[in-house]
Amino acid sequence: MIEMRIAVAATVAEAVAVTVAVAAAAAAAATAVVAVVVAAAAAAAVAVAVAVVVEVVVVVVVVVVVVVVVVVVVVVVVVVVVVVVVVVVVVVKVVVVVVVEVVSSSSSSSSSSSCSSSSSSSSS
């Protein structure tokens, strides 16, 4: 009887030892899983931070490109306006010179014709 109890106790002790070993292995596996989850969370946080930085950099680059395009458009418009103003000024000067020449030649022609007509009438 005592031997039987000792055998049962030994079997129970062995079962407890196996249970403790399995529990320790499960705890180690759980710890490893937690470590992997923490590492994945850290990697995700780094990825989010990198994505935010990349997004900010992309937004800054887009804003800079838009500003440069706007400045180039404004410069082109200013150059076109200056060219148009210069062309208008040159055309106006040419027109004024032509009008002055025409008027002065017309008046001198008229005056010389008047002089010649008066001289021809006095000689007759």
Image: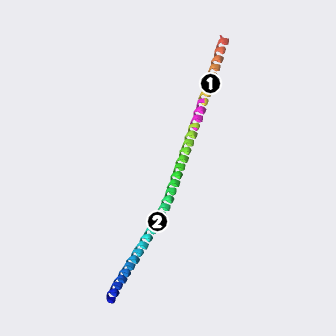
SS under mark 1 = helix
* Residue type, numbered disc 1: Val
Task: Tell me which label, 1 or 2, sits earlier in the chain.
Answer: 2
Closer to us: 120 or 41: 41
Queried whether the magenta region covers residue 91, the answer comes back as: yes
Spot the residue most to the front: 1
* Residue type, numbered disc 2: Ala
Does the magenta stretch mainly form a helix, a strand or a loop?
helix
SS under mark 2 = helix
Q: In which quarter of the image is residue 93?
A: top right
Marking on residue 41: 2
Magenta stretch?
A: 86-95
Depth check, mark 1 against mark 2: the one in front is: 2
Q: Is residue 113 above or below residue 71?
A: above
Queried whether the magenta region covers residue 90, the answer comes back as: yes
The image position of residue 101, as x and y in percent, is: 61, 27
The image position of residue 49, as x and y in percent, is: 50, 61
Marking on residue 72: none
Closer to us: 51 or 94: 51
- Which residue is depicted at the point 48% across and 63% down? 45
Closer to us: 115 or 55: 55
Q: How crowded is mark 1: few (under 14 residues within 10 Å), some or many (20 or more)?
A: few
Give the number of callouts. 2
**Quarter of the N terminus within the rendering:** bottom left
Real-space CA distance between mark 1 and mark 2, rounded to the nearest whole angstrom: 91 Å
| Left or right of 73 in this view: 26 | left
The image position of residue 56, as x and y in percent, is: 52, 56
Closer to us: 15 or 119: 15
Q: In this view, does 116 lie above or below 95?
A: above
The image position of residue 15, as x and y in percent, is: 35, 80
Q: Mark 1 points at which residue?
A: 103
